[in-house]
Image (cartoon, rainbow, N blue to C red):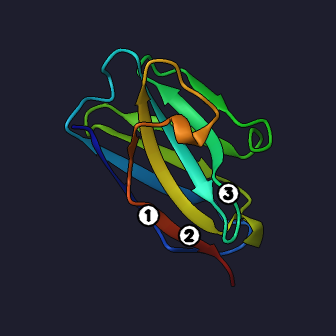
Amino acid sequence: QVQLQESGPGLVKPSQTLSLTCTVSGGSILTNYYSWTWIRQPPGKGLEWMGVIRSDGSTYYSPSLKSRISISRDTSKNQFSLQLSSMTPEDTAVYYCAAKRFTWHIDPTRYDYWGQGTQVTVSL
């Protein structure tokens, strides 16, 4: 059973870059046909798919975030990471890492495995 755990700062100042890490256990991020993604949920709003890194290392990002987002991985630690630059209060949300088998999808509800989520607040 794949398990995911997010880690990173809970508070970020405006204009700073957010860095979050997802540690994967129970499976390898190199396993063929798995997609590893970041999803967020602002307060009072729905889930927003942010981007994905596939098992082959290729990445795809939401067009609305493409200028600010980067997803990378550390295969030696079985981790993948999110960087989101130029943070504003509108980026305040619970951030989740998630995974699914086979084709990645922009619909967050299609993901099979989820971390518990981490609250990120953007404020001075």
**Residue at image point 51% right, 70% down:** 119
Q: Nearer the viewer, mark 3 or mark 2?
A: 3
Distance between mark 3 and mark 2 Cα atoms = 16 Å
User: Of label 1 and label 2, which has the lower sequence position?
Assistant: 1
When the figure is inspected, residue 81 is found, relative to residue 89, above or below; the finding is above
Q: Amino acid at mark 3?
A: Gly
- Image-based side of 36 in relation to 91, left or right: left
| Residue with the mark numbered 2 | 120
Direction from residue 116 to residue 69 in the image, left or right: right
The nearer-to-camera label among 1 and 2 is 2
Please tell me whether residue 44 is drawn above or below residue 112 in the rendered image.
below
Crowding at label 1, few (<14), some or many (≥20) Cα neighbours within 10 Å?
A: some
> Which residue is denoted by mark 3 in the rendering?
46
**Tag shown at residue 61:** none
Cα gap from disc 1 to disc 2, whole angstroms: 9 Å
The answer to whether the residues at label 1 and label 2 have Cβ atoms under 8 Å apart is yes
**Does label 3 or label 1 sit earlier along the sequence?**
1
**Is the Cβ of the residue at disc 3 closer than 8 Å to that at disc 1?**
no
Q: Which amino acid, by three-letter code, is at mark 1?
A: Gly
The outermost residue toward the bottom is 124
**Foreground disc of the pair 3, 1:** 3
Which quarter of the image is occupied by the N terminus?
Answer: top left
Label 2 crowd bin: few (<14), some (14–19), many (20+), radius 10 Å: many
Q: Which residue is painted at 80% across and 43% down in the image? A: 64
The residue wearing badge 1 is: 8
